[in-house]
Amino acid sequence: MANPFVHVELNSTDPATAKRFYGKLFGWKLTDMALPVGTYTMIDVGDGTGGGMMQQLIPGAGSFWLPYVLVDDIKAATAQARTLGATIMKDVDEVPDMGWLSIIEDPTGAMLGLWEAKI
């Protein structure tokens, strides 16, 4: 399938509470990784699309889940989104050894992550 959802990320105002809640609710395997800006918790769900959790970095924003869609060319997809009326919330950024992401807000106000994996 072209452009599947490949990752879902919780940007939380209280990651410790979120980890306890979702770990107990679903039995997800949660693994912490150090980041330059804190900790990123990988979510292993077994079968299906996994994700991650991290501290909310947008000042004044509440907690929210952000889905990511796989694209073949992150720069082209981000540019096309802009052309179609999206606001670029986070321009293309590399995740070392993993790939590249960008975050857009569509013309209706919904946020979506775009992801290009390193091959």
Image: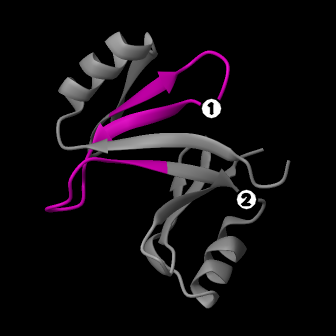
Quick check: is 53 in the magenta stretch? yes
Residue 28: give x, y in percent of width and height.
46, 15
Residue 49 marker: 1
The numbered mark, 1 or 2, whose residue comes first in the sequence reads 1
Q: Position of residue 26 (x, y in %)?
A: 43, 15
Side of 67 where 48 appears, left or right: right
- Is 99 covered by the magenta stretch? no
Total numbered labels placed on residues in the image: 2
Please give left or right for residue 38 compared with residue 50 in the image.
left
| Residue at horizontal 54 percent and vertical 56 percent from the top | 94
* Occupied quadrant, residue 23: top left
Q: Which residue is mark 2?
A: 71
Q: Considering the numbered disc 1 on the image, is that residue within a helix, a strand or a loop?
A: loop
Q: Secondary structure at mark 2?
A: loop
Q: Quadrant of the C terminus?
A: top right
Q: Is residue 117 above or below residue 32?
A: below
Provide the residue span drawn in magenta. 40-66
Q: Is residue 37 above or below residue 52?
A: below
**Disc 1 residue type?**
Thr
Tell which of 97 and 7 is nearer to you: 7
Residue at x 64% of width, y 53% of height: 69
x and y percentages locating residue 29 in the rendered image:
46, 13
Q: In terms of depth relative to the viewer, which is nearer, 119 or 4?
A: 4
Q: Nearer the viewer, residue 105 or 38?
A: 105
Distance (Cα) linking label 1 and label 2: 16 Å
